[in-house]
Image (cartoon, helix red, strand yellow):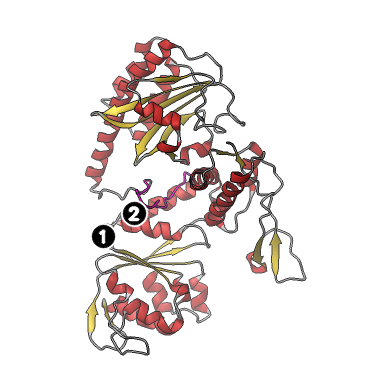
Amino acid sequence: MNALHALLPLLGDLAVELPAEQRYYRVLGALRELVPSDALALLRLEQGELVPVAAHGLASDAMARRYRVANHPRLNAIIEAQGAVLFPPNCDLPDPYDGLIGSSALPVHDCMGCALRINDKTWGVLTLDALTVGQFTEQDLQTVETFAMFAAATVVAASRFDDLLRTVAGERKRAEAYRLSARRPKPEMIGNSDSFRQLISEIDLVASSDLTVLITGETGVGKELVAQRLHDLSARADKPFITVNCAALPEHLVESELFGHVRGAFSGAIENRLGKFEVASTGTLFLDEIGELPLAVQATLLRVLQGGQLQRVGSDKPHVVDIRLIAATNRDLAEEVRTGRFRADLYHRLSVYPLRVPSLRERQDDIMLLAGAFAEEKRWRVGVPSLRFSDSARQALVGYSWPGNIRELEHLMARAALKAKKRAASLKRQSVLSLELRIPRSSGHPFHEHPATDSTMIRPPIPRLSGHP
């Protein structure tokens, strides 16, 4: 393959406005023409982790994984090297893509990579894998090293184009939702399905406004993440984001928790205390499980929302509050209104802009992306060198109905990683984790019902993940 012929399209791309993702995949396509490979990946370095932004030949769940450089010696070696690195076929260093190329553990194979540097700072890495031993040559190594410079130029162009889009659109610099903080991982929204993209589009549309948003959806679908994104993309992003789980508040303390109290207002009120509304002032207040609020508190909440003022328990003095309110529930509030368990006027005040979060059953294309992200996170937390999915495991995960939604999937990956730490075993379709759930009859879940009980017993065929030392 003529190198100039492969590079010319990339040079032409530098003068064209293209989305970053399209540029990245065009980079990999050109590299694949120059150096035939079974798998290629472009990964961006973010706070000590390498995040895939484009890949060919890797399993779908690889794109949602985060590779902590300190835990992957090969990736670390690529970053530390001054040029491209070609690993010997019998290299003892574990391969970060074990189980992600093909359907089994990687055999002895060729692997090389090169860091991409912009202004003497490492932006990320290019990796190449060939399942045929000896396929990569010293000439290929030099080719990749030279190609990395063109790839870096493409990255710069993509970055400038993205900056231009943000400027033209007048958007705020978005909170880095796909990064992990140094001290605490920040949950992120992951997905690529049509329903997920539609949700993100709706979030991005309403985020810049101050409209009250009512988030609905089943338990475990990620309503708090939606609220967090709404806050992060709003004009209040640098202000407080306060979360209140209404279902966890004792009924006799709900008003005090929300609106505050003064000293002596009730037994145990030994000092003045701000409520969550005042704590969240100038920021965002997220009321989760708002359908659990008692009717008396609903009336008080309505007055606060209508007047923009509150009175602390035990005081007649009004306090002005400036917040953006986001509420969430897994209940059908319209039905709750019809049955008298929720105030109609409050319901209409809250549902200025309703957002429904789809269940995981409606996001089948996202299951393996999420599973890959959770598997990588849990693997790292418990110290398992590698977790991979067999074909039967992928089929079982995608075919399961997930009544507990994303939270259930996350918990499954956590248990699987913990079990894999103690023993390595191949994936089986039969459940080794013996996952048991109780779903009320009213849920309409299609599994077998036991007439002697008031619930449906579900034993789905969820597989166990293997641990590979």
What secondary structure is the stretch in magenta mostly built from? loop
Closer-to-camera residue (116/267): 267
Q: What residue is shown at x 53% (from left), y 56% (from top)?
A: 407
- Quadrant of the image containing the C terminus: top right
Residue 182 in magenta stretch: yes
Q: Residue at x 33, y 73 (%)?
A: 276
Q: Which of marks 1 and 2 is nearer the N terminus?
A: 2
The amino acid type of the residue labelled 2 equals Leu
Query: Label 2 crowding class (10 Å Cα cut-off): few <14, some 14-19, many 20+?
Result: few
First to last magenta residue range: 179-193
Q: Establish if 87 lies above or below 268.
A: above
Which element is circle 1 on? Answer: loop
Q: From the viewer's perspective, is residue 409 above or below residue 327?
A: above
> In this view of the protein, which residue sits in the foreground, 243 or 262?
262
Badge 2 element: helix
Question: In this figure, which residue is indicated by the disc labeled 2?
Answer: 205
Quarter of the rendering containing residue 163: top left
Number of residues whose C-alpha sits closer than 10 Å to that of mark 1, classed few (under 14), some (14–19) or many (20 or more): some
The residue beneath circle 1 is 236
- Residue 374 visible in the picture: yes
Mark number, residue 83: none
Residue 396 quadrant: top right
